[in-house]
């Protein structure tokens, strides 16, 4: 039973609440249109949309808006300036809504492009901005038929991570190998430049030159590292949900989100560093008074750091897969990591994450050993040889990449598992495929 | 026997085919970790006991025999006991518990022969003695690489013994806390007229939702309940509004569907 509820009219009665901007340009002479919220995009969250609407209808509570969403489609504005309506449309569409703009009924009679009330909720592809790669998947997560998603235990998460790594080995391995290779090449280049001899005239100039180059190469490494991290999340997510992915495609999908990912990760680092720094300073002062108190404070500091790290374990996944960034991404990660989905201490979300990390580390270490052992033997046999040193370094890079990728894949699958348990992600997908 | 990526299909001489899900590295590592904890606790207990015995026995023994047993001998016996526990733990449990150790049982895993039959002492001994090769230098580097390339997730010990590790139960069905609805006092009795329109896959989704809704958070639970109920209402073209909540409606659909299925 679809009916048109005039939310905007109701809000007008309240007197204060109008669409921001609609009020600001009310005297503008531009074309007036009707703005309708027709429905939710596939897989979009009602809660997220209610939050977005609250930013427009400031006087309304979450509950009011959620109730209003039950009566879709809604008329958001009857007489809004077209330019402003377009802005609101774009904003709401980015939050998972299907919004339509049409001419008021009086003009519609003469204009064939108008949308009649109660029209089928289909997005007008011509008006929607072109989604960038991967965006469509996030707003409408597609799960290929035959892909079995269900709540998993720790063992099954790690099993599926292993299968995924085995089935898409080169894709995932190459994604994570790229920053390592870049770092290796940059560090080798620096080594040659600064140990090669007479390139610099004085030790001071050499030191400054080295410092500047090291600074820039560290920045480049950081960017490439985060890029690879995002690309890996994209590739694992695509393949896990039954789609194809490629190294170039996954790196490409991350291009527009890279800034937000780096920014959010740096913000997270700062938020972690501040309390730890405070603990450090207080600890240094206390050390002069009592060693015991310092030890207790150090333990508390480690506990706090672990707590925060576990809370923000999903931040990168949230930024890449949910298009959220900054504090909202940190909050969303905390929300996921504090979900109470199963009873018992050992089955709490954080404890499961810790066990997955521990087991992932152990298995990853096994992989690492396998690559490092031949390197170590080579190192012993050909001491001093540049070829052996390079080969040793390359084997080390491969070992580190393998160890990293396995745990990273497991954590991405765990992100989906939390969503499956907390949000019924799999059931939503199954329901939409019925 | 034919295998696919994650499962192994076994055909009996009577041409009966049954399928097992193969255990992967993750669940096996989790089981191994638990077994390791149990083994180390046992070994630690043996050493504590041996140390206590070494210091207390001479005082407790009036015959003086214990005097002759030096502490070194007691410790040697403890080391022997350690070896027996370390190796014997896996051999003993897998042979006696039908291919399971406490860790494997907790993870729902079982070692079986490639033809699906339970393993015996010989298979258990071979696969566990060769564990020393798989685990060389700790953390199973060889075992991991062999499993990586194995179509049946077998390590060297498994190849030698002709065994595979399978998952006994893929996942537990979450029963939920709410009891099934009584079909005698329904709010929407008219549902019965539309039950033929519910297909098995739709029933499966509804049932899973009702079983798992306690795990979900409030907002998503409400949203999903609404989505499922609306799908049914739109498909059935039922006029008017629901008398109860979406979940009550879904409970009634599932209860009536199950009742009808039982009757058939």
Image: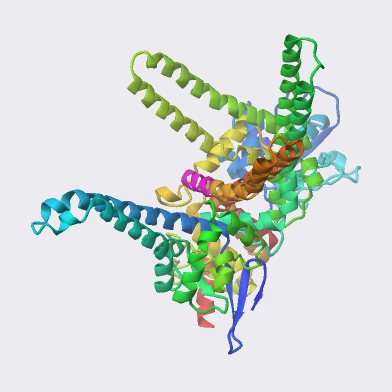
Q: Is residue B106 left or right of residue B44?
A: right
In the rendered picture of this protein, how many numbered marks are placed on residues?
A: 0
Q: Is residue A350 magenta?
A: yes
Instruction: Name the residue nearer the viewer: B154 or A281.
Output: B154
> In the picture, residue A227 is in which quadrant?
top right
* Span highlighted in magenta in the image: A349-359
The N terminus of chain B is located in which quarter? bottom right
Residue B46 in percent (x, y) is at: 29, 55
Instruction: Name the residue nearer the viewer: B68 or B16.
Output: B68
Q: Residue at x 79, y 30 (%)?
A: A84
Residue A231 in sight in this render: no
Q: Is residue B63 left or right of residue A188?
A: left
Q: Residue furthest front?
A: B68
Instruction: Name the residue nearer the viewer: B247 or B15.
Output: B15
Q: Residue furthest bottom?
A: B14
Q: Residue furthest left?
A: B62
> In the picture, residue A101 is in which quadrant?
top right
Residue B129 in sight in this render: yes
Vertical side of A248 occupied by B112: above or below: below
The C terminus of chain B is located in which quarter? bottom right
Residue A38 in percent (x, y) is at: 73, 47
Q: Is residue A266 left or right of residue B111?
A: right
> In the picture, residue A57 is in which quadrant?
top right
Q: Is residue A328 magenta?
A: no
Q: Residue at x 16, y 54 (%)?
A: B67
Chief secondary structure of the magenta portion = helix
Instruction: Name the residue nearer the viewer: A417 or B57.
Output: B57
Residue A314 in percent (x, y) is at: 59, 40
Q: Is residue A422 left or right of residue B92?
A: right
Residue A383 in percent (x, y) is at: 68, 37
């Amino acid at each position: 039973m679809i009916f048109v509820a005039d939310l905007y009219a109701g809000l007008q009665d309240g007197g204060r609440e109008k669409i921001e901007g609609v009020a600001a340009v009310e005297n503008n002479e531009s074309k007036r249109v009707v703005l309708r919220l027709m429905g939710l995009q596939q897989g979009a969250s009602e809660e997220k949309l209610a939050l977005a609407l609250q930013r427009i209808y400031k006087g309304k509570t979450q509950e009011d808006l959620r109730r209003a969403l039950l009566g879709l489609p809604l008329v958001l504005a009857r007489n809004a300036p077209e330019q402003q309506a377009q802005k609101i449309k774009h904003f709401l569409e980015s939050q998972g809504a299907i919004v339509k703009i049409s001419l008021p009924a009086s003009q519609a009679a003469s204009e064939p492009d108008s949308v009649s009330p109660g029209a089928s909720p289909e997005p007008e592809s011509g008006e929607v901005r072109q989604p960038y790669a991967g965006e469509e998947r996030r707003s409408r997560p597609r799960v290929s038929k035959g892909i079995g998603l269900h709540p998993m235990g720790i063992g099954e998460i790690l099993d599926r991570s292993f299968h995924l790594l085995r089935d898409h080995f080169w894709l995932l391995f190459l994604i994570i190998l790229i920053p390592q290779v870049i770092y290796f090449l940059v560090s080798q280049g620096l080594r040659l430049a600064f140990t090669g001899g007479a390139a610099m005239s004085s030790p001071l100039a050499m030191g400054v030159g080295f410092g500047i180059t090291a600074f820039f190469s560290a920045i480049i490494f950081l960017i490439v590292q985060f890029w690879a991290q995002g690309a890996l999340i994209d590739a694992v997510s695509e393949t896990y949900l039954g789609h194809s992915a490629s190294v170039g495609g996954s790196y490409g999908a991350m291009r527009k989100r890279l800034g937000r990912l780096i920014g959010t990760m740096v913000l997270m680092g700062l938020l972690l560093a501040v309390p730890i720094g405070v603990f450090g300073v207080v600890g240094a002062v206390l050390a002069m008074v009592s060693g015991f108190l310092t030890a207790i404070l150090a333990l508390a500091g480690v506990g706090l750091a672990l707590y925060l790290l576990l809370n923000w374990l999903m931040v990168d996944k949230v930024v890449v897969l949910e298009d959220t960034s900054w504090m909202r991404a940190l909050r969303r990660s905390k929300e996921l990591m504090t979900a109470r989905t199963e009873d018992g201490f050992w089955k709490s979300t954080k404890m499961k994450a810790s066990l997955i990390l521990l087991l992932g580390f152990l298995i990853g270490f096994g992989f690492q050993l396998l690559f490092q052992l031949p390197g170590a033997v080579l190192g012993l046999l050909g001491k001093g040889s540049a070829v052996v040193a390079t080969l040793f370094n390359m084997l080390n890079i491969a070992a580190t990449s393998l160890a990293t990728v396995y745990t990273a894949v497991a954590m991405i699958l765990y992100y989906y598992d939390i969503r499956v348990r907390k949000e019924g992600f799999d059931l939503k997908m199954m329901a939409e495929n019925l | 026997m034919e295998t696919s990526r994650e499962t192994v299909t076994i055909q009996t001489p009577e041409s009966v085919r049954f399928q097992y899900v193969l255990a992967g590295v993750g669940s096996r590592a989790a089981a191994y970790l638990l077994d390791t904890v149990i083994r180390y606790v046992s070994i630690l207990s043996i050493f504590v006991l041996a140390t206590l015995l070494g210091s207390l026995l001479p005082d407790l023994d009036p015959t003086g025999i214990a005097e002759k047993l030096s502490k070194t001998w007691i410790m040697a016996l403890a080391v022997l006991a350690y070896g027996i526990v370390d190796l014997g733990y896996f051999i003993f449990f897998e042979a006696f518990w039908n291919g399971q150790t406490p860790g494997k049982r907790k993870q729902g895993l079982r070692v079986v022969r490639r033809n699906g039959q339970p393993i015996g002492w010989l298979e258990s001994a071979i696969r566990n003695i060769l564990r020393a090769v798989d685990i060389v230098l700790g953390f199973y580097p060889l075992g991991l690489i062999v499993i990586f390339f194995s179509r049946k997730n077998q390590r060297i010990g498994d190849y030698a013994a002709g065994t595979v590790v399978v998952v006994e139960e893929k996942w537990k069905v979450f029963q939920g806390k709410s009891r099934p609805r009584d079909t005698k006092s329904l709010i929407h009795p008219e549902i019965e007229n539309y039950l033929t329109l519910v297909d098995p896959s739709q029933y499966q989704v509804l049932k899973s939702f009702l079983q798992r809704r306690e795990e979900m958070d409030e907002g998503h639970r409400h949203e999903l309940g609404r989505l499922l109920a609306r799908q049914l209402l739109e498909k059935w073209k039922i006029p008017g509004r629901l008398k109860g909540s979406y979940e009550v409606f879904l409970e009634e659909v599932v209860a009536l569907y199950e009742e009808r299925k039982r009757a058939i």
